[in-house]
Amino acid sequence: MSQYPIVLISGWAMPAGAMESLAQALDADHRRVSIVELPGLVRESQACKISHDWNSLLTYLDHQLFEKPAILVGWSLGGMLATLYASRYPNNVAAVVNLGVNACFVQKDSWQQAMDPTLFASFYQGMSLSRDKTLQQFVLLCSSGSPRRKELSKALQALLSDADLEHQAEDNTLLSLLGLLGKSDIRSAFADIHCPVTHLFGNEDALVPVVAARAIEQGFPRHRVQVLDGGHCFFMDNPSPVVSEVRRLSSGEGSIST
């Protein structure tokens, strides 16, 4: 079995700690595991000052990959970044496992299986006017659908409370990345990617509608799609399906030919 390093990529506004339980589960499977936290939760002077666009994020991720090729496990915005990186740098990525990742985060005429634009606009405005309150709402959306919703909500809120968010009054990184997420459309990267790709979805995800799973399955038949119990943080409730998928991909199953 090939022992590729595993790199977990956290989502928008979520500290690396949100993926710690998954990292521990993978580490128990005797793997080299690291977590990449997206900019926005630490001062950019600490996280390499970057522009808030895909090219800069791709460079940021590349600097975090100390061993290549790696299996990238990306959550939400982190999964979009993993997909784009694998498409652009195919030799650096052995496989991609996407957790709660849509092809477009917000509905488009040609992709209706996503968040309603009005809802997103309201959320974006909330981030610009009342960051703390909006992040609390985001935590509730992330924990929705979990069998232990209250416990998970408290855990996520505690992670955010420990994050360095005081600089956000003068630093618009989270808002800029939210805008990038709202405009995202990675269908071309889905089509171009040649390494094995697995998409895992929560059947009660409040941020990525489960109908997106079927749309991706139909639109990109070379990709593997699974729907699991839970919400946007399904892997925090039960990391086993993710560990099993990483194990399967490490064994060489699911290869995509060029």
Image: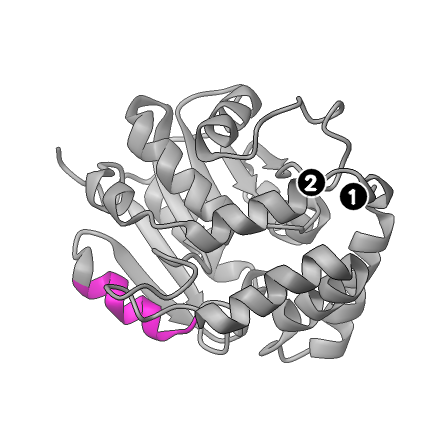
The structure residue drawn at horizontal position 26% and vertical position 37%, both measured from the top left corner, is 195
Please provide percent x and percent y for residue 8: 55, 41
Residue 28 visible? The answer is no
Which residues fall within the magenta stretch?
209-218
Q: Nearer the viewer, residue 144 or 67?
A: 144
Q: Is residue 257 above or below residue 227?
A: above
- The quadrant of the rendering that contains the N terminus is top left
Task: Check disc 1 and report its element: helix, strand or loop.
Answer: helix
Marker disc for residue 168: 1
Q: CA distance from mark 2 to mark 1?
A: 8 Å
Q: Visible in this render: residue 37? A: yes
Q: Amino acid at mark 1?
A: Gln
Q: Is residue 248 a member of the stretch shown in magenta?
A: no
Quadrant that contains the C terminus: top left
- Residue, x 71% and y 47% (percent of image)? 15
The one nearer the camera, 178 or 98, is 178
Q: Residue at x 69, y 40 (%)?
A: 40
The residue where tag 2 is placed is 40
- Residue 239 is marked as none
- Tags 2 and 1 touching, CB below 8 Å: yes
Within-10-Å neighbours for mark 1: few <14, some 14–19, many 20+: some
The secondary element bearing badge 2 is classed as loop
